[in-house]
Amino acid sequence: MRIELRASFALLSALFAVGCSRGRDAALQTLPAVGSAVPPFSYPGLFADTVTSASLHNQPAVVAFWSSTCPASREALAAIQSLAAAYAGRGVRVVLLADDADAMTLPSTLQGVGDLRVGVAAGTLRATFSQTHVGPWRRALPLPSFLVVNGDGRIVYRWVGIERAVEHRLSFVRAQLDTLLARQAGA
């Protein structure tokens, strides 16, 4: 019994660290490829105007796929908010696309999101962004997931999950943003 509990806990911990998905490599395969354009999307904004793919052009952006029903997504929210605040003055737009079907529950979940734009995808993220549908676990896009997008609307980096250590949360996404901004400044 104890071995089964330990194995179950280890599996849940691994899924939590990677996100609500089945392994980082397999999960990355479901996201649009690096170098491809962000698929066109238009979602009602939670607190403001419609959030669209066109709003990502002409400036670097991070698109975060999220859901209040995913424990790893909820754990990532503070890091996403911190990312938005840290890069707002540097011309980076951070967009959170919430896959929650019920927009009525989101305002309390997302109180005080600051510089974060929130689009309500209402269960359509997989149809818009998923590139593969292999196996029964591909019923949903891995959450949380992140796309780093350049000013031309092209994906330059993808990341799935949230790092367990708070001080390292979204460090890979931040490093890619810093590299992208340095290249733009040097151009």
Image (cartoon, grey):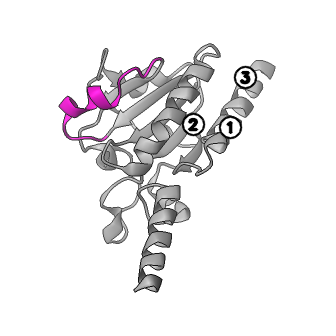
Q: Is residue 104 or residue 179 the one in the foreground? A: 104
Packing grade of label 2 (10 A; few <14, some 14-19, many >=20) is many
**Residue named by callout 2:** 148
- Residue in view at x 41 percent, y 28 percent: 53
First in sequence: mark 3 vs mark 1:
1
Report helix, strand or loop for mark 1: helix
The N terminus lies in quadrant = bottom left
Numbered disc in front, either 2 or 3: 2
Is residue 99 found left or right of 34 in the rendered image?
left
Magenta includes 160? no
Q: Is residue 185 above or below residue 61?
A: above
Amino acid type indicated by mark 2: Val
Q: Disc 3 designates what residue?
A: 184
Q: Which SS class for mark 2?
A: strand
Tell me whether circle 2 and circle 3 mark residues in contact (CB < 8 Å). no
The magenta segment is 99-114
Left or right of residue 51, residue 146 in this image? right
Badge 1 density bin: few <14, some 14–19, many ≥20, Cα 10 Å = some
Query: Which residue is tagged 1?
Result: 176
Q: Are marks 1 and 2 in contact (CB under 8 Å)?
A: yes
Name the kind of residue labelled 1 in the image. Gln
Judge whether residue 107 can be spotted in this image: yes
The residue at the point 46 percent across, 54 percent down is 19
Amino acid type for the residue under numbered disc 3:
Gln
